[in-house]
Amino acid sequence: MTKPVITALLVVLLTGCTSTPSLQFYVLEPLSQPSASNIETAKKHTIGIGPISVPTLLERKQIVTRASDNTVQIAEFQQWASPLQDNLLQALTRNLSTLQPNNIVRTYPWSIHGTVDRQIIVDIIRFDTTPGESANLDANWTIKNEATHTVLQSGHTVINRSITDSSYPGMVRALNKILGEFGQELSLALLKVESSHYK
């Protein structure tokens, strides 16, 4: 057997022995059922969610995790099924639709559906996990009167919840949970806005 043939066979054997991990794709799921913090308003409103901005670090397909030594891990084979910015927008919209059954909730841009009464703008500063430690959300948000472009309320939300499951499915579930908590905070802020409006 000639040397080139032997080399070719070795390459084939080595290739067969190494396998590339398969890609895993994840999505953020909305709340599965209404929460106890559901809002009932005197008047039906149309609520617009967005735009939502995310840090440049999160503008990628790969899931990003952080370590306690200020390093980050970018998982090549654990990815979001759609851009995280879009996924956050869709999940928050559906969460608020669940939390605000008497209002109509639209996703930005909503021009195809007409105007909205209230607009919620969200600037995500942090949305990640530290494996085995915590799931973290840090965001600034503003509720505006769409017609007058005036700010009705603004706030800064920080949510850190401990996690023990360091698998990627477990970490995504933890992110789902804190996103649900964030939606509840926005829902309560809308209640305060409407309560003060009708005083």
Image (cartoon, rainbow, N blue to C red):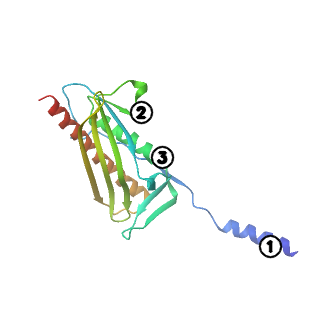
Image coordinates for residue 119, horizontal then vertical, percent: 31, 34
Label 2 crowd bin: few (<14), some (14–19), many (20+), radius 10 Å: few
The quadrant of the rendering that contains the C terminus is top left
Q: Is residue 140 left or right of residue 19?
A: left
Query: Is residue 31 visible from the viewing direction of this image?
Result: no
- SS class, disc 2: loop
Which residue position holds label 3?
A: 83
Marks 1 and 2 sit apart, C-alpha to C-alpha, by: 58 Å
Indicate the amino acid at tag 1. Thr
- Residue at position x 64%, y 67% in the image: 18
Vertical placement of 31 versus 162: above or below?
above
Question: Circle 2 sits on which residue?
Answer: 109
Looking at the picture, does residue 72 appear above or below residue 48?
A: below
Crowding around mark 1 (Cα neighbors within 10 Å: few <14, some 14 to 19, many 20+) is few
User: Seen in the image, is 104 located left or right of residue 64?
Assistant: left
Real-space CA distance between mark 2 and mark 3, rounded to the nearest whole angstrom: 16 Å
Disc 1 target residue: 7
Real-space Cα distance between discs 3 and 1? 43 Å
The residue closer to the viewer here, 101 or 160, is 160
Q: Amino acid at mark 3?
A: Pro
Tell which of 149 and 47 is nearer to you: 149
Q: Residue at x 48, y 61 (%)?
A: 74
* Residue shown at the point (28%, 58%) measured from the top left: 161
2 or 3: tag closer to the N-terminus: 3
Q: Position of residue 54 (x, y in %)?
A: 40, 49
Q: Do we see residue 51 in this rendering?
A: yes
Whether residues under marks 1 and 2 lie with C-beta atoms below 8 angstroms apart, the answer is no
